[in-house]
Image (spheres, rainbow, N blue to C red):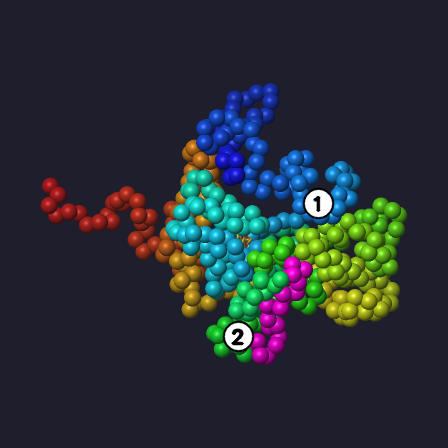
Amino acid sequence: MGDYYEPWTYEYEHLLTAPAGEHTPVARPTSLLTGKDTKITWSANWDDSLAGGNELAAADPILAKVSGAVKLEYEKAFMFFLPRICEHCLNPSCAASCPSGAIYKRAEDGIVLVDQDRCRGWRMCVTGCPYKKIYFNHRTGKAEKCTFCFPRVEIGLPTVCSETCVGRLRYIGLLLYDADAVAQAAATRSETDLYAAQRSVFLDPHDPRVVAAARRTGIPEDWIEGAQRSPVWDLIMRYEVALPLHPEYRTMPMVWYIPPLSPVVDALRDTGHDGEDMGNLFGAVDALRIPVEYLAELFSAGDPAPVTAVLQRLAAMRAYQRRVNLGEERDESIAEAVGMTGQQMDAMYRLLAIAKYDERYVIPAAHAEIAHGLEELATECSLDYEGGPGMGGSGPFGEVSGRPVPLAVENFQVLAERQRSDNLPDPTTRGRVNLLNWDGRGRPEGLFPERKDKS
Ligand code: SF4
């Protein structure tokens, strides 16, 4: 329990049934093991969002590496939010650590999933994932993780976290990569070479040889076109502003991040300098050792060069676009200073700042040829399982809204409709194709013929 934390729920029922009184009722936490009141002191990702920071920050290995120069006075620290989901790694250590072979990377789209039927609850994956992105469901006794909203992705819709991000920060796109080169890249000796090694695995979708090879292996035309329009390719390979999170973990993570320029801009502004001026920004990127070193520990195994290059590109884009917005003459030397052209600056600005939905998410839908396999897989979503989050009604393991248990028979159109719908399916029609309209429980009247010998 110390390692996996004590599961708990809240006394939600009390919020609804408490008698009218002077104080607003609260939902106290209760232990799912004992049913008694409990005090929450630890859970999965407890240290995210600074929870537990007072106890844990001193042991932060990254802070230790930046030589104790950071004072743990939060009001003086620079802060940025780093939302983390499963990385759907090219070399997933969660899968490697599963004794049951329940975790697999889908060949169709690279999404990493837990087969709930095969999972035996060993929990090796919980410790095996260095990003701590596997959670143990105490009710089902199975491991769960981000599913990259695969039923949505299959029909060309972005994940819910992407679509609902108010900052419009997330981008989804297709990347072609050389699967045979992954193991060697992951074994690159020097940690600081891993960023370049992972980039070398990605294949240029504009290269005619890559396109021809993709066609030979049966990759559909719209997927190749999707790879060519991929915003993720542009951010990682064309503009080189996205970096992998902790490449030194060697799992070849596939959720990449654009390091924030804000600590640098804030520092300039706080000291009365112009935070849009390229000279100031470049100087500050060099001078502000701590933010850059810290970011380098997150995104480039401690090598400050890739992070500095990204921050300089972002700084240049700021300075270049300010002139454009103020109606001043374009200063091509700003773009040249970071190895770009003015046109590329415009395109990068457009993608980062004002790109529309269709440019941020370029997701070709799954193909009818493989739809049958995908439909069956769709029932394996851990979130839809009895006991999964939001499942199963009120009971000792949580209060939930409850939804129909999925059935294996569902056609592609119905799946697409369900994913696009704003409402939950009507439980009486279930929104699914079920030839018998029977969920396998009980004996609905008329389902079976009357027994002849019934008297
Ligand atoms: S982030 Fe963790 S859970 Fe996700 S694929 Fe990588 S190793 Fe597995």
* Label 1: element kind: helix
Q: How dense is the environment of label 2, judged by Cα within 10 Å: few (below 14), some, or many (20 and up)?
A: some
The quadrant where residue 186 appears? bottom right
Numbered mark located on residue 214 in the image: 2
Residue 195 within the segment the image draws in magenta: yes
- Foreground disc of the pair 2, 1: 1
Above or below 51: residue 65: below
Quick check: can you spot residue 88?
A: yes
Q: Residue at x 52, y 22 (%)?
A: 19
Quadrant containing the C terminus in the rendered view: top left
In the rendered image, residue 111, in percent from the top left (x then y), is placed at 51, 58
Q: Is residue 117 left or right of residue 61?
A: left
Front residue of this view, candidates 384 and 88: 88
Q: Give me the disc on residue 64.
A: 1
Would you identify the image quadrant in which residue 201 lies?
A: bottom right
Which region of the structure is painted magenta? Answer: 190-211
Distance in Å between CA atoms under marks 2 and 1: 45 Å
Residue 452 shown in magenta: no
